[in-house]
Image (cartoon, rainbow, N blue to C red):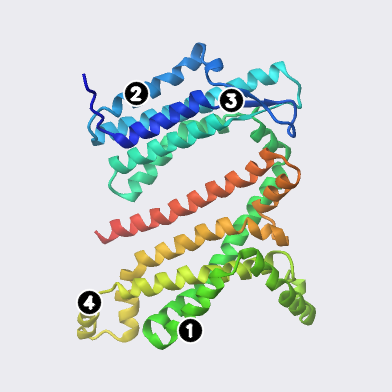
Amino acid sequence: MIIAVKNRVLLTLLILLLLAAFGLPFLSYAPNRLLSGKPISLISLLHGPALWLLAPMLVLAALSLLAPSRRNALLTALAASALLTLAFWLSGHAAQQLAQEGSKLARTSWGSGCWLILALSLLMAADAMTRFAASHLWRILGNLLVVLPALALLFGHQLDQLSLLKEYYNRQDVFDAALLQHLTILLATLVPALLIGVPLGVLCFRSRRWQTPIFSTLNIIQTVPSIALFGLLIAPLAGLATAVPWLAEHGVSGIGMAPAIVALVLYALLPLVRSVVAGLQSVPASVIDSARGMGLTRGQIFLRVQLPLALPLFLTGVRILAVQTVGMAVVAALIGAGGFGAIVFQGLLSSALDLVLLGVIPVIVMAVIVDSLFKFMASLLEVSRR
């Protein structure tokens, strides 16, 4: 008897998940934060209530044999959410038991198998929500509902004995300061980039004579490595702070946040200017002619016709530069800008993997949130147009 597979994407992800779950260590237990841990397999933990972890795997296997539909997509998302939540619960429960048996310095961390289970569960849920919901708005809300049970375990202190959470509680003040600094860098980059990039984009759209030199300059800036650009800005800004004491009093110097923001603004200009030009070019000429025939002035045509129609592509450019800034701000810690990059590099220097993850994971989460927020705004724009 031949079994027909209807959802090959789901089956592929499930096979990878099973290989990771039963072929790689689920947890790692170490005497302290610096020593390598002893692997703990998932099979050794599957007893009692932990056996419920197999239930969503069986459901997902059955769903891969059914034809894709909105109902099956919803069931897939629910099963993936259950698998994600149960993996969270099992890791936290096992960490609590190991903490009671071992010393206070011992650390229990997620193994490669657990990381892959979590990642593949999220991929299954995201793929299912793409099939279930047609609009970006419902996809975002659906994906949020998928992770809510797992977040409830996290904020309910069920994972506190994991090494990553222990690292967080030991450095909560540093983490909060890094979060504030990272958000400051993001906002301080977006505002000047918008003030400079939007007029440049409009200029490039209206005057082809300026397009070549502006885009050539921005392309050259984009090819310069970030660390090199940070280094190139140290001397000019240090000299400027020396020549103008008022700037030095307000935090401008060769190192710190000032050169980081200048460099990130320069990197942000290319995607922003291109999105402005592309958005304005996407407006049909017939629409502009109709507006001109109605007696609208050039400024009125831009504000009432071109700008609203170009807004979706413009938001796409802002989304790209915002996500890019969140990631590149990590490197800015090398010149004293702070943020989560400072935690990452401190972890690298001390060979503490948990400390590195404490800086990396919030950056990933922040990038996903920023990306989702701009997609949410774009979806609201689409709904308002309808």
Nearest to the eye among marks 3 and 1: give it.
Answer: 1
Q: Which mark is residue 287?
A: 4
Residue marked by disc 1: 213
Type of amino acid under label 4:
Val
Nearest to the eye among marks 3 and 4: give it.
Answer: 3
Nearest to the eye among marks 4 and 1: give it.
Answer: 1
4 and 184: which is toward the camera? 4
Type of amino acid under label 2:
Val
Whole-Å distance between the Cαs marked 2 and 4? 52 Å
Residue beneath the point at 54% across and 48% down: 364
Circles 4 and 1 in contact, beta carbons < 8 Å? no
Circles 3 and 4 in contact, beta carbons < 8 Å? no
Whole-Å distance between the Cαs marked 4 and 1? 30 Å
Whole-Å distance between the Cαs marked 3 and 1? 57 Å
Q: Compare marks 3 and 2 and give the one earlier in the sequence.
A: 2
Residue beneath the point at 38% across and 75% down: 277
Q: Residue 282: x, y in percent?
A: 30, 72
| Mark 1, other Cα within 10 Å: few <14 / some 14–19 / many ≥20 | few
Residue 15 quadrant: top left
Q: Secondary structure at mark 2?
A: helix
Q: Residue 40: x, y in percent?
A: 60, 22
| Farthest top residue in view | 48
Q: Compare marks 3 and 4 and give the one earlier in the sequence.
A: 3
Residue marked by disc 3: 92
